[in-house]
Amino acid sequence: LQLKSWYRRFRPVAFGTAILIPVLAYAGFAVAGREVRLIQDWQQPLNDSQYGQLLEMMNSSWWAYVALLAAIILLHLAVAAQRKFKPAIRITYPGDQRVPAIAGATLLETSRAYGIPHASVCGGRARCSTCRVRILDGIGNQPGPDERESAVLERVGATANVRLACQLRPVADLSVVPLLPAHRTSDASVQTLDKYFWGVEQEVTLLFADIRGFTQLSEQHLPYDVVFVLNQYLANMSQAIADANGYVDKFMGDGIMAIFGMDKPVAEGARDAIAAARAMSGVLDALNMSLRSQIEHPFRIGIGIHTGVAILGRIGVISGTGAGERVTALGDTVNVASRLESATKEHQVELLVSAETLQAAGYQPDDGEMREITLRGKSGPMSVIAKPRALQLQMPER
């Protein structure tokens, strides 16, 4: 059980229970005996027949205990004999370090049992590929990968001699080389590290926003004016996102990408994203008023919002250049949110919100409010709400 991640949390409870049972049993026996002694006219409540049955039960319980104890001792002796006469499965690690495999345990569990550093960010659940190893010898005698392991290996483009240590249960001698730095990153210790350095898969809400006609604005103004106006816009929009509990992922020219719900439930993140879009629409009106002397035409923006599973991580931080310090999001959810923002131009609206976000936020659309649109690169239609102004989308009730 010490190889199981949940056992570390359960062990103090099990230890306390193991101590309390005999202690409380003895305490009950002592208290009951003391109470019996205090009764002056105490009479035996059992007749001779009942007393004989009680003694018989006590004798049977004693022999049952002896039989159970003997069975446990015989089981240990049988296991020891099997280990002695049956050839042990040997695992060979880099540096010619050899250890006997633990019967029924995974390769990752064997590594941990013998204190061999082995990377594993997801805790041995086949949710990442950080524990993968290259099999140098003995792969032909091992069971093949199951469907879950095969999916992960296919996703990372692994060759036939690469396996996940958290899924491989050796049945014959094996020689392996871990493919990632062998840090001690068990599922218990990884929580104390920067989880975004390793990457986490999480359901979040993504918001993309972009200025309409910014290229034309850039061509008509001096570079210094363009930078000034753009900084005014980005600063105000970033503040609106931050006020709505969002995280500004990055600026892409005149575009903004923000993440909501990184450290809170999905429903709250979706509602925060809608609140941010409404705030950005209001901020845009004030910004156009303040910049009317610098720009000929008021700013117009497009906002796309989508909720789904994304990979959050610090990309590029390992380069040592200082790049990648901020958390970014990767995956299809990001692509969908970006394409929703691009589609606002085609549909001539300021805001497009996916049905996934509305459902997560608890928004109840009116009859006819939803529409079906087709996004570039997507085979089927997608249900969205489209609003000419983001302020027209009412906040869902909490």
Image: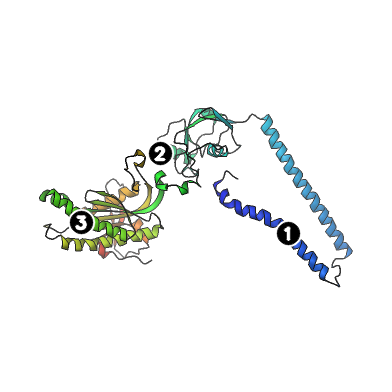
Q: What element carries label 1?
A: helix
In this orientation, which residue lies closer to the viewer: 79 or 34?
A: 34
Q: Quadrant of residue 101?
A: top right
Q: What residue type is labelled 3?
A: Gln
Residue 212 seen: no
Q: Alpha carbon of mark 1 to alpha carbon of mark 2: how far? A: 56 Å
Relative horizontal placement of residue 89, taking residue 200 as reference (left or right): right
Residue at numbered disc 1:
25
Query: According to the image, label 2 marks what residue?
Result: 155
Residue 358: x %, y % from top left: 34, 60
**Image side of residue 29 versus residue 287, left or right:** right
Q: How crowded is mark 2: few (under 14 residues within 10 Å), some or many (20 or more)?
A: few
Sooner in the amino-acid sequence: mark 3 or mark 2: 2
Q: In this view, does 57 lie to the left or right of 307?
A: right
Q: Residue furthest bottom?
A: 41
Residue 150 position, x and y percent, is: 46, 38
**Residue that appears at 81% across and 68% down:** 36
Side (left or right) of 254 relative to 306: left
* Disc with the residue nearer the chain's start (1 vs 2): 1
Tell which circle, 1 or 3, labels the residue nearer the N-terminal end: 1
Place of residue 247 in the rendered image (x, y in percent of width and height, measured from the top left): 33, 54
In this rendering, the label closer to the viewer, 1 or 2: 1
Q: Name the residue under label 3.
A: 232
Q: Which amino acid does label 1 sit on?
A: Ala
Residue at 66% across, 30% down: 86
Q: In the rendered view, tell whether residue 10 sits above or below residue 80.
A: below
